[in-house]
Image (cartoon, helix red, strand yellow):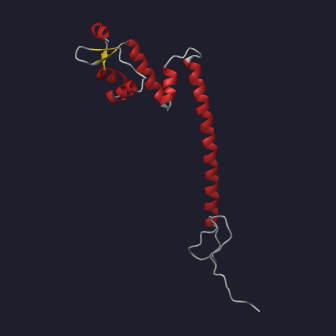
Amino acid sequence: MDSRRQARGLRIGELAKLLGTTTKTLRFYEQIGLLEPVQRSDSAYRLYDDHAVETARLVIGLRHLELTIPELQQLVHEDGSTTRRRRLLALMDERLRRTYLELGILQGRIEDLAARHAALLATPRDRPPDCVCDALLRACTCQPISLAKTS
């Protein structure tokens, strides 16, 4: 950044280009309180100083971790009780816990689907051609039931 630009700050388009994002994204971050322009130019352009650039860089980096907006807000704004690193570790611990739980659920679904698929492949040939009872893991109800009494 040249000294003249540094003294006045970066305009939003310059910041977006520097960070590889869009002005729309930066405006959204401003709207939800993650990013604040330091000042406005005489022409009402948003101007960002070095601190705002670093904050924007942090937000964009944290978004790559797929954090929610409230999680981002929690990390960007200083709360004094714990360090940003500890807060991020806590969020990542929780995200890992949830992901492992989701993975276990998906593994169970895969095993169930595979069992139903295998059962359908193994359906005896004497069944009607449209029978799917084995995929439903139940006794076949597709055979016509004779209501005639046998004496």
Q: Residue 75: image x %, image y %?
A: 51, 22
Residue 14 image offset from top left, x and y in percent = 30, 20
What residue is shown at x 61% (from left), y 37% (from top)? 98
Q: Quadrant of the C terminus?
A: bottom right
Left or right: where 29 falls relative to 76: left
Q: Position of residue 120 (x, y in %)?
A: 61, 66
Residue at image position (58%, 22%) is 87
Q: Quadrant of the N terminus?
A: top left
Compared with residue 92, is residue 135 higher up or lower down, i.e. above or below? below
Above or below residue 12? Residue 116 is below
Relative to residue 119, is residue 148 depicted above or below? below
Towards the viewer: 36 or 150: 36
Which quadrant holds residue 34? top left
Could you tell whether 82 is left or right of 9 in the image? Answer: right
Residue 20 horizontal side relative to residue 66, left or right: left
Q: Quadrant of residue 32?
A: top left
What residue is at 63 percent from the left and 64 percent from the top? 136
* 135 and 83: which is toward the camera: 83
Q: How many marks?
A: 0
